[in-house]
Image (tube, rainbow, N blue to C red):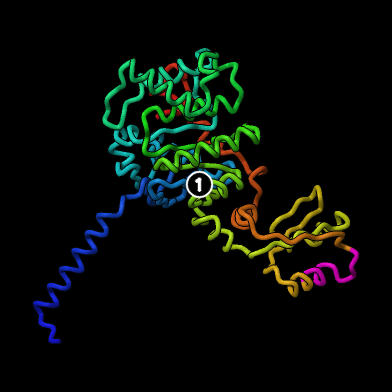
Amino acid sequence: MTITRRNAASAADAAHAAHAASSAAEPAPAIEAAGLRKSYGTHEVLRGIDLTVPRGTVYALLGPNGAGKTTAVRILATLATADGGTARVAGHDVRTERARVRRAISLTGQFAAVDEMQTGAENLLMMARLAPSAAGARLSRTEARAKAAELLTRFGLTDAADRLVKTYSGGMRRRLDLAASLVGAPEIIFLDEPTTGLDPRSRKELWSLVRELRAGGTTVFLTTQYLEEADQLADRIAVLDAGTLVAEGTATELKQRVAGHRLDVTVADSETYLRLAHHATYSDPETRVLGIPTDGSAAEVRGLLDALDPDRTAITSFTLHSATLDDVFLTLTGQPPATAPQDTAAIAAQPTASPTAPLKDSSHV
């Protein structure tokens, strides 16, 4: 077959058109950020981070206190302005299209932004009357009552609807707060440390609600310092440390970045613990446990035990387990979340929520 210049040009045009059609068919990311920077005084909180969050997914920003997670959320939710970089949320620029961004999102912070002196039903009715829809219109009183009733049922609060919120448990308040954030049917919801202060049962209940949101097509941007939470919920995880993204991927991909297994050895005394600590990526001085990366093979485990304890007197017991997000976190950040410093700059800059003025100060943007 002879290929003429015209045929070649036609083929190129067809390929270009097919590529353009394919690109057009792909939905734009829910969140795109490039080079975001933010400082408070001389303290650099974000150091040029890039984020891409696909629509309809749960995306976890994982990091210790002080890493800059809350600052990142505040910029993406238009509550703070970045010093540099760009960001688009729901297809809108966070700097020049703030109103459109706010109509497409909702934000639930670390503490429930509900009025304790109102009932659960009154809180949701107030939010339903005040929160604009994606089109910018407000619900009528009848529509607002129907929306409040729907959310009370959905979040298992019908029996407590007429009780004052001050009588609610922590888990119930968090459910009410999340229900209030969904009044406007947002495309994207930001959950900033949503399970802080919750007991294990309430935490699991909130996890179920997050899964339901994802199943319904809502994009969930979750910040957390709880490794299990990110592992259980997130489609993708970004690890933020001291304002820098140090890793990003699925939980499985992140676990593959560290050794496939970890050998945990319990040593006989504190002197031995201090002598061997430099070999470990995980350490617990209270129990004198040291965690050492390994490929998990019998030959390597025997070799490690022989190297660490040639006289068979220093190690009292050992266990072998697969790599977890805990191992990833410790390897990448060098510190366990519980001992990290607080993100004091971001917290100090955050306005105090006012339950009677939800659109101005509340977390429900």
Residue 308, magenta (yes or no): yes
Q: Looking at the picture, does residue 18 appear above or below residue 82?
A: below
Q: What stretch is highlighted in magenta?
A: 304-313
Image coordinates for residue 308, horizontal then vertical, percent: 81, 67
Q: Looking at the picture, does residue 285 appear above or below residue 262?
A: above
Image coordinates for residue 27, horizontal then vertical, percent: 31, 51
Q: Quadrant of residue 270?
A: bottom right
**Residue at 52 percent of width and 42 percent of height:** 223
State left or right for residue 190 relative to residue 336.
left
The reply to whether residue 41 is visible in this rendering is no
Image coordinates for residue 162, horizontal then vertical, percent: 51, 13
- In this rendered view, identify the residue nearer to me: 101 or 159: 159
State left or right for residue 324 relative to residue 345.
right
Q: Is mark 1 on a helix, strand or loop?
A: strand
- In this rendered view, identify the residue nearer to me: 182 or 329: 182
Viewport quadrant of the N terminus: bottom left
- Label count reads 1
- In this rendered view, identify the residue nearer to me: 350 or 199: 199
Q: Looking at the picture, does residue 99 appear above or below residue 93?
A: above
Q: Quadrant of residue 90?
A: top left
Image coordinates for residue 75, horizontal then vertical, percent: 41, 39
Q: Which residue lies furthest to the bottom in this view?
A: 1
The reply to whether residue 94 is visible in this rendering is yes
**Residue at 85 percent of width and 62 percent of height:** 315
Residue type at mark 1: give it. Answer: Ala
- In this rendered view, identify the residue nearer to me: 190 or 58: 58
Viewport quadrant of the C terminus: top left
Q: Quadrant of residue 141?
A: top left
Residue ID for mark 1: 60
